[in-house]
Amino acid sequence: MRVEGTFLKSKLGRRVFALFCLAALLPVTALWLLTRGAVHEERERTIEEGRIALAKAYALSVFERLDTAARLVELPAGAAPSLDTLAPLFESVHELAVASGDATAGALAEAAAEAPAARLLVLPPSASDAWPRVAVVRRSGGTAQPAFAAVLSQKYLWGSPDELPAGVAVCVRDAEERPLFCPQGGLSGVAAPSWPLFLKPAFGIDSWTFAAAPDPTAVEREGSLLRTFGLVAAGTVLLVTLLSLVQIRRTLVPLERLLGRTRQVASGSYAPLHLPRDTEFGQLGAAFDEMAARIERQLGTLHALAEVDRRILTALDLDAIIGLVLGRAHQIAPGARMSVLHFREPEAGLLDIYRCAADSGQALRERLHCDPQLLQRLGRDKDGGWRLLAADDPWHVLLRAAGIEPHRVLPLQVRQRSVAAVALDAAADLDPALLDELRELGERVAVAVAAKQRDDLLVFQARHDALTGLPNRFDATETLAAALVRAANTAGRVAVMFIDLDRFKPINDGLGHAVGDAVLVEVARLLARELPPGGYLARYGGDEFIAVLAHAGDPAGLGRIAATLSAALAAPIRVGTTELQLQCSIGIAVHPDDGTQAETLLRNADIAMYRAKRSGRGQYVFFEERMNVEAATSIRLLADLRVALRERRLHMEFQPRVDTRDGRIVAVEALARWLHPVEGPISPVLFVRLAEEGGLIDALGEWALDEACRCFVNWRAAGVGISSVSVNVSSHQLDSARIEDYLRDTIARYRMRPGELEIEITESVIARDLSRVAARLEVLRGFGASIAIDDFGTGYSSLQYLRLLPFDTLKIDRSFLLDIVESEAARTLVRAIVAMGDALGKLIVAEGVESNEQVVLLREWGCHFVQGYVLYAPMGPQRLLEELGSWTSKAGQR
Ligand code: C2E
Ligand code: CA
Ligand code: CA
């Protein structure tokens, strides 16, 4: 809305303008009226005083002339003075004789007789005169002085008109009010003030009254005064009008701008006004700007909170919600550097720390482990607001540990447990309103965490069985489906075991549901305990349980697991005072052979379970018959292996490791062999796995180590110059605590020198837990064994471990060598591996070398050792001794 120049359209503008005008006009008018009256009165008074003074002055001058005339007449001349001497004062002189023929003299004589004391006589005007004639009388003082009267010249007596101020009229009357001299018409109509001239003492007649006419200049002056006043008044009104317009403009323009901006604020636009601050309007504008900014900020925060609420109610993604909160906090208080701590798993001391990147404002999450006891020390907060932190406050300690330099913290609690916290780094004093907003934002995190906990609980309850705490049928189906999808991608095998209690109904019916429930809880506990790591157990319904084994092994392994589960339940259990012996039937279905869908697998496992029940309970049955056979075979084999190990019917072969520079046998790798009396030779790949699954691996490992070292010391005693023997150690072996003992014992027993025994660890072991494996290897190395990484390039994607792991030798897997003769790419790869190992200072062995071309290339690239059928196949210790002997003699002949 434009206001400049148009403000008189504003109602307020018009009103103020009218008020201003009225305020100017009223006093001016009143003053005008008052002044006019006063001026008029004053004029009247002045005029009257002037008139009286004028009349008086005139009267006195007339008196003076009369007096002069009287004196002249009284001159002691002997006779009547001649007119000549008396002119020009007198008009005529007359002897007072009644009988005179002179009419004037006669009239004078009559008059003198009528007033014997009078020295002035007034005669009616003559024919030539306009006014009565006045004569001075000299009474006869005897004979010497005859009485006569001298008629005064009118001109002398009344003076010339010029002697009076211009425009002044006079009027003289005698005591009888007869006009004696009234040249301007006798001042008729004017109640003129008069001044009486007493003539009695001097002339013996009654007073004459003198009046003077008003002075027109006085009227004139009054007029000009009022005109001036009028001009001043008009000027004043004009000035007031102008000033009022200016002031209204000054007032209304910022007011209109404020009004306009208020409307904009109402419609959601918050651009500041920037009024000049010199007036109250400016200050109002500044206050308004501040208010608008605050409203904008608060509305923004409200929007953010609403968005957070929306997300809490919909997706409930804690990361996103905390990101929103941090983003908003960063917007309104970037200097405060808010961070959020979420106690993800307080019992494990696992924290998530969220921070805002200073440049992008993007929330970043970091996971941190801290001492769980630190979290327990935090305690409860009753006040529930910002807390300024002292250095020894447990919160301070915690936040510092998380890498935050906190100034204040807002502990967030759900059901009186600290679940999260918001920390501000800023030491600067923050505006309390801003702190309130930040607190509100922070508290939303607690709401989100509470909602998440509640959701998780609901999800947990929806997916878990209330009695045993195990996942329920719904969760089992979904979990199985997800495992199948993963297995399909990795070509893995997934086994489903359908476990059903035998004769549970009589327990439930006979001993009551409470006992039944207790039995089920105990069964769940036992099954969960016996399940291999990574296995999944659910209660499928009533007395049915489901086990899902991703990465399922062969039927034999599965059979053993099933047997273990059965065995666990077969042990007597105590419920209250009752001791019970349970039994279960297990049906096994395996993806992909028995189905690729969860439902199919479950149904087939169920079918297999019924077969198990039919074939006499307490059994496990594979859905596919072939697997039942395989499982049975494996189990028989395992039993045989156990016997073979006990009776030391395994034997060891050795494959030479050859120096590429001169073809000398420098070392050997021990490879276990088992010749089964019925099945013939069994691959170590198979029987090592059987041993691992059947708990025989330590026995096998101990035997292999002993056998290898025994042979080695024999060769050493025979004087053949090989420097070391390598023994394979499987991942299960490395996990077992016993390896340390028998390795140390064996080294001591055979007095193996450092470096004479090498342990080969397959690369895939390392992938599991690098730091743990590194620690183990360090221990083994400490006993004097050197370490080789076996099958390099097959198990682990990151090369980082090469730097972190303590080892001496790198064995390049045979798969890398397969086409180095044909393929340039394969050559490049192996050359790079050799160069890298060399650069790390490791010995490099290429294994599974099958052609001479390969040997030539490897030697060219600087690979230190080769091992493979093209040079030597694995052989018995005696053969080896012969080989070494012939080699030594050959060398000797050269
Ligand atoms: P490995 O440690 O990679 O052993 C090398 C395997 O490659 C041996 O198979 C060996 O006979 C074979 N080989 C050697 N040169 C060539 C060649 O030029 N071409 C081909 N194709 N193969 C060659 P073997 O003896 O069947 O052993 C298989 C695996 O069984 C071994 O792999 C090792 O992991 C394991 N094993 C053998 N003996 C033991 C033992 O005493 N303890 C443990 N824990 N594992 C053992
Ligand atoms: Ca090996
Ligand atoms: Ca190998």
Image (tube, grey):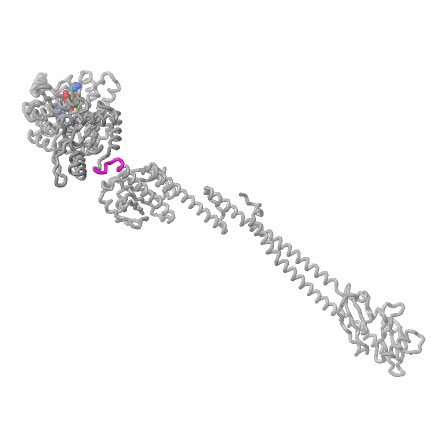
Q: In which quarter of the image is residue 565?
A: top left
Q: Please, which residue is most extreme toward the right here?
A: 101
* Residue 549 in the image, given as x and y percentages of width and height: 20, 29
* Residue 640 in the image, given as x and y percentages of width and height: 9, 24
In the shown orientation, is residue 891 left or right of residue 852? left
Q: Where, quadrant-wise, is the C terminus in this rendering?
A: top left
Q: Determine the residue positioned at 7% across, 30% down.
A: 751
**The one of 738 and 202 positioned closer to us in this rendering:** 738
* Residue 776 in the image, given as x and y percentages of width and height: 16, 33
* Residue 320 in the image, given as x and y percentages of width and height: 33, 37
Figure check: 730 above or below 228: above
Is 634 a magenta residue? no
Q: Determine the residue positioned at 26% across, 31% down.
A: 478
In this rendering, the count of numbered labels is 0
Where does the magenta region start and end? Answer: 460-467
In the shown orientation, is residue 380 left or right of residue 248? left
In the shown orientation, is residue 218 left or right of residue 807? right
